Image: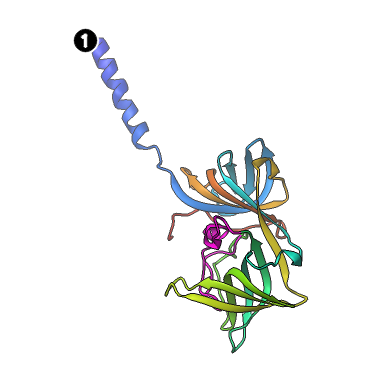
């Protein structure tokens, strides 16, 4: 009888522990990498309860941003251009990110991180390979954006073929480069390539609001003044 009572009490005490276990929440967190240990690295971020996030990236897809030569702008390459748009719809690019097609499509490449947008003006959800500014995007009236494959090159001008994500129609956007245009490329790297003084934007799941994160995708880019601010939150929040 005593054994039965003890067993019942033990089972009762286990119920709250099981019930209180937090379910994983999908989200993202970003910040500068401050330490690396094997397939785990730590970043600092103001919106983590502890000010840091410990990221397990052993099974994650990891990409890195690096400076790209102008020769990477070839017909068939995938590009994401951000800048200003004039009255004729021409985008003067401040930044262009280059990627190679995946299975013949640009939408399977870095677009899965940023989302394709309406060529020539509608903002993307997130810049590929980068981290969103604090407070989200706030674009001016002449904001210009183009994403798709390069179909034509002529000096410092290129034509980008994309798809309007609202109408699903094909779009052609003229993108102009200047001496101020920066070019970068997205490369898939190994977890061993994660180093300190890099900025990491992490997609994954967490049971403790981002204190620890199991990453599914990681984007690496050069450190931005030692900070990369974003919080770990539920999708849509």
Give the left or right position of residue 126, taking residue 237 as reference: right
Q: Which residues are magenta?
A: 101-128
Please name the colour scheme applied to the rendered image. Answer: rainbow
| Magenta stretch: includes residue 226 | no
Q: Residue 109, percent across and down? A: 56, 57
| Magenta stretch: includes residue 115 | yes
Give the left or right position of residue 66, taking residue 170 as reference: right
| Residue identified by numbered label 1 | 1
Q: Which residue is the extreme one toward the bottom?
A: 87
Q: Residue 82, percent across and down? A: 62, 72
In which quadrant of the rendered image does the C terminus lie? bottom left
* Residue 90 seen in the current view: yes
Report how many numbered discs are placed on residues in the image. 1
Q: What residue sits 56% from the left and 62% below the top?
A: 106
Q: Quadrant of residue 183?
A: bottom right
* Residue 45 seen in the current view: no
- The residue lying toward the viewer, choosing from 60 and 187, is 187
- The residue lying toward the viewer, choosing from 24 and 90, is 90
Give the left or right position of residue 104, taking residue 11 as reference: right
**In the rendered image of this protein, does residue 50 appear above or below residue 161?**
above
Q: Looking at the magenta stretch, what is its main secondary structure?
A: loop
In which quadrant of the rendered image does the N terminus lie? top left
Q: What residue sits 40% from the left and 42% below the top?
A: 23
Q: What residue sits 59% from the left and 50% below the top?
A: 218
- The kind of secondary structure element at disc 1 is loop
For disc 1, the neighbor class at 10 Å (few under 14, some 14 to 19, many from 20) is: few
Q: Residue 12, percent across and down? A: 29, 26
Q: Residue 27, percent across and down? A: 48, 52
Give the left or right position of residue 213, taking residue 186 as reference: left
């Amino acid at each position: 009888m005593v054994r039965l009572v003890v067993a019942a009490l033990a089972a009762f005490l286990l119920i709250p522990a099981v019930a209180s276990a937090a379910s994983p929440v999908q989200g993202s967190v970003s910040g500068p990498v401050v330490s690396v240990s094997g397939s785990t690295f730590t970043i600092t971020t103001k919106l983590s309860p502890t000010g840091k996030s410990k990221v397990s990236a052993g099974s994650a897809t990891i990409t890195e941003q690096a400076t790209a030569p102008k020769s990477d702008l070839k017909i068939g390459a995938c590009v994401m251009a951000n800048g200003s748009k004039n009255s004729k719809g021409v985008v003067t690019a401040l930044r262009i990110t280059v990627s190679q097609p995946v299975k013949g499509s640009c939408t399977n490449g870095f677009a899965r991180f940023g989302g394709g947008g309406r060529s020539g003006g509608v903002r993307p959800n997130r810049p590929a390979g980068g981290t969103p500014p604090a407070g989200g995007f706030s674009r001016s009236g002449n904001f210009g954006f183009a994403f798709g494959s390069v179909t034509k090159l002529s000096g410092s001008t290129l034509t980008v073929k994309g798809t309007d994500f609202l109408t699903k129609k094909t779009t052609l956007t003229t993108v102009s480069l200047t001496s101020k245009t920066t070019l970068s490329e997205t490369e898939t790297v190994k977890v061993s390539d994660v180093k300190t003084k890099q900025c990491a934007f992490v997609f994954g799941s967490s049971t403790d609001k981002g204190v620890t994160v199991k990453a599914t995708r990681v984007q690496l880019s050069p450190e931005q003044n030692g900070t990369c601010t974003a919080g770990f939150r539920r999708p849509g929040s």
